[in-house]
């Protein structure tokens, strides 16, 4: 399958002559990434799908794996390769709508990491509740909802809402995690088991968040390393910063 990236579209536009028609053809088994599609629209170039399944009014052309439904088609599912099937194979799953991909699709793997991240948050909430740290439990609940919103934004191809966690903007989160001495009177500290169960649990959650961020980059980068969903990657990066902040808050008695 040929992926039509922003760079390929840009090269096409550069080679256009004044006499050329402002039409860009997308053929069967070709994928037009969202950033490439936006570039075409910015240059007033019409997208013409040739021998491909066209989207209907409620279509599902999203993110880079382009697949569409046909009103006249009776098949229940369609794969990103253009194959129409009535039964979903066990080795495939939904990318969005009735569009199927293999279960090792990078976006599906990323969604699995988000699911695991939610599970890890719940585990840390139990630890904090056991230690009667209700404010920590509440802050973790806000984080849980934030992660669920990331998943929703990815599935629906919507931007992640503005990053404000525990009343802190993304800029403030970054600053506080980088300069703990300024805000907590402590320099950077490597977590130790002697710091206790809560610190170790929060640090485990922080590390898992960073791992999830790396999976997000793998899911949304193209062959040239450019990404379509920087908002998701940034959200996870700032979440890991927040968890550092929470560790320092706990270490300095702000959750007592």
Image (spheres, rainbow, N blue to C red):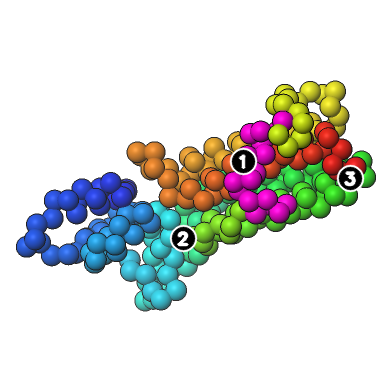
- Mark toward the start of the polypeptide (3 vs 2): 2
3D distance between C-alphas at marks 3 and 1: 25 Å
Q: Residue at x 54, y 37 (%)?
A: 214
Q: Which residue is mark 2?
A: 99
SS for callout 2: strand
Res. 251 visible in picture: yes
Q: Which mark is residue 133?
A: 3
The quadrant of the image that shows the C terminus is: top right
Q: Are marks 3 and 2 in contact (CB under 8 Å)?
A: no
Q: Are marks 3 and 1 in contact (CB under 8 Å)?
A: no
Position of 150 relative to 248 (above/below): below
Q: Which residue is mark 1?
A: 174
Quick one: label 1, few (<14), some, or many (20+) residues within 10 Å? some
Q: Is residue 103 left or right of residue 199?
A: left
Residue 12 on image: x %, y %: 19, 52
Count how many numbered circles sit on residues in the image.
3
Q: Residue at x 88, y 49 (%)?
A: 134
């Amino acid at each position: 399958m040929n992926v039509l990236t922003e760079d390929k579209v840009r090269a096409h536009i550069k080679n256009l002559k004044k006499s050329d028609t402002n039409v860009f053809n997308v053929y069967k088994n070709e994928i037009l990434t969202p950033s490439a599609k936006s570039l075409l629209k910015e240059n007033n170039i019409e997208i013409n799908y040739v021998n491909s399944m066209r989207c209907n009014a409620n279509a599902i052309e999203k993110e880079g794996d382009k697949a569409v439904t046909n009103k006249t088609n009776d098949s229940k599912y369609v794969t990103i390769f253009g194959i129409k099937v009535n039964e979903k194979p066990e080795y495939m799953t939904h990318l969005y709508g009735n569009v199927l991909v293999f279960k090792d699709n990078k976006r599906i793997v990323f969604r699995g990491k988000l699911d695991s991240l939610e599970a890890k948050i719940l585990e840390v909430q139990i630890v904090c509740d056991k230690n009667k740290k209700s404010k920590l439990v509440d802050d973790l609940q806000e984080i849980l909802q934030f992660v669920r919103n990331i998943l929703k934004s990815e599935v629906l191809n919507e931007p992640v809402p503005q990053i404000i966690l525990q009343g802190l903007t993304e800029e403030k989160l970054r600053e506080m995690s980088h300069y703990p001495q300024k805000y907590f009177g402590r320099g950077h500290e490597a977590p130790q088991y002697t710091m206790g169960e809560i610190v170790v649990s929060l640090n485990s959650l922080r590390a898992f968040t960073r791992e999830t961020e790396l999976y997000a980059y793998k899911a949304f980068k193209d062959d040239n390393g450019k990404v379509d969903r920087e908002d998701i990657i940034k959200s996870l990066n700032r979440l890991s910063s927040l968890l550092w902040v929470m560790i320092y808050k706990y270490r300095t008695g702000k959750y007592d």
